[in-house]
Image (spheres, helix red, strand yellow):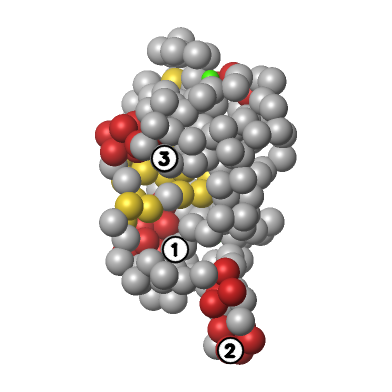
Amino acid sequence: VKKGTATLANLRSPSAIANGVVQRGVGSDDYPCNDDGNDCTDIFAVSILGVSPSAFITWFQAQQAAANSGKRLLTNAEWQMAAAGTPDPGNTPGASDCATNSGGADTGTRSNCVSRFGVFDMVGNFFEWVADWVPLSTTCPPPLFAGDLNCLAGASTTSGPGALIRGGDFLSSTSAGVFAVTGSGKPSSAFSSVGFRCGR
Ligand SMILES: [Ca+2]
Ligand SMILES: [Ca+2]
Ligand SMILES: [Ca+2]
């Protein structure tokens, strides 16, 4: 995983399974470390074509999984750049379009859901943690473009912080998109439709 060469066959081989290799965060919060990430020495991050993304992971855990793998969370600005040009199908996606109004899709299987930089699934499917923190958001002003979620306002004075989440999910419909952003999730929280992606 650290070298970027791990295949699905590697990870599902009998020897890997015997050594305890297992995908976490598919259907339940089963991470073997605390939500604060402080003891997350044994989780790793890898994106593999045709495999369901992991969710139920806190920002703290995602950051540690990335670091353990020689990777890191994207900044908000990097995420925005990488997502540019991804077609936004709104509430009526076709079978090859971004998963914005359906169940979750396996990684990279929606052939139209690719940015001009060749990055898949940034619109819809699973929301994605990015690196940046903000005061916890409590309000959603009108969208900038394409109905995309815009919940980065109303700094809480009673709770927080928030960590930014991007892109929308498989049920977001028109509110998914390359401009979709929310600061209403704490870095200590886990959600069934929020995963993450890494950069190196
Ligand atoms: Ca947890
Ligand atoms: Ca996504
Ligand atoms: Ca949209």
User: Would the CB of label 1 be found within 8 Å of ligand 2?
Assistant: no
On the image, which quarter does residue 132 sit in?
top left
Along the line of sight, the residue nearer the viewer: 21 or 152: 21
Tell me which numbered mark, 3 or 2, is placed earlier along the sequence. Answer: 2
Helix or strand or loop: what does disc 1 sit on? loop
Q: Label 2: few (<14), some or many (≥20) within 10 Å?
A: few
Q: Does residue 44 lie above or below 59 as drawn?
A: below
Q: Label 3: few (<14), some or many (≥20) within 10 Å?
A: few
Residue 137 in view here: no
Amino acid type, label 1: Ala
Q: Which residue is mark 3?
A: 118
Q: What residue sits 41% from the left and 12% below the top?
A: 144
Name the disc covering residue 45, or none. Answer: 1
**Are discs 3 and 2 less than 8 Å apart at CB?**
no
Residue 153 in view here: yes
Q: Position of residue 13 (x, y in %)?
A: 61, 82
Q: What residue sits 49% from the left and 19% below the top?
A: 148
Q: Which residue is mark 2?
A: 15
